[in-house]
Amino acid sequence: MIKKLLPLAMILAMAAVSCTHKSATTGATAVSDNSPVLAKVGDKSITKNMYETELNTIPDQVRGYFLKQGGPQAFLDQIISKELLYQEAVKEGIDKDQRLQAAVDNYRKISMVKLLLQKKIGADLNVTDNEAQKYYDSHKEDFKMKEGKAAGQIVPFDAIKSLIKQRMAGEKQEQAFASYVNELKKSAKVQINDQAVKDLAKEMPALTNTPTGLIQGMPGGK
């Protein structure tokens, strides 16, 4: 095993991002897999196709960490560890634990919401070069250099076009999200028990002291 890796953290990261997929190492696949077998854990084979499927489900940063630190063997080690833990969990009866079903249901709900938002507002997030240029022209003061010999000079549009597009896409996402949710609220019956919410705030004062940075990172946050 590659000792430089953090096994538990990596395994949890892998599990979190692959929950919406039927894991190649933990569930039967509907399609025949004739690719080379890279390893076996008990009676379970880990094939090249399974390996690549797992690798493609993790974020680029995590994938890069594995490949830089130990190459293909490092990631294979983590798949083996995850399969060992999975098999042990089944032996312990964890697959029948009600908390597991609750977690699966919650992740399914989150995944469905994510796909819905991609379907409904994803197409509206594209920012054209013309839109970026107009934004740049009306916010030139925001793009002045503040330090060094170039202080006071405005950064050329081409140098920051991609950053402007990212900023505008983020603003579009917030606006589209808020608009879509408001439309849903109009057509649905949403009732809030104000007294119960006040009582909850008294019981959980920590909720009223949430760092603003956490709110800003959420869709619709300001």
Image (tube, helix red, strand yellow):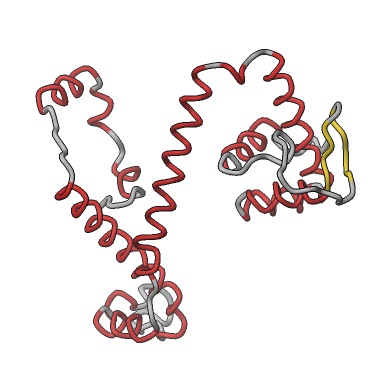
Front position in the image: 4 or 40: 40
Q: Residue at x 61, y 34 (%)?
A: 12
Q: Residue furthest left?
A: 195
Provide residue 109's location: percent of width, then percent of height.
42, 39
- Please name whichever residue, 143 or 7, is drawn nearer the observer in this view of the structure: 7
Left or right? Give the position of 88 relative to 221.
right
Relative height, residue 44 to residue 166 (above, below): above
Residue at point 35% right, 60% down?
120
In which quadrant of the rendered view does residue 6 lie?
top right
Residue drawn at point x = 75 percent, y = 31 percent = 83
Task: Point out residue 99 in the picture as x, y percentages from the top left corner.
Answer: 49, 20
Q: Percent from the top left, x then y, of residue 28?
A: 72, 37
In what quadrant of the picture does the N terminus appear? top right
Residue at position x 22%, y 17% in the image: 203
How many marks are shown on the rendered structure? 0
- Left/right placement of residue 1 relative to residue 14 reads right
* Residue 191 x, y percent position in the rendering: 14, 34
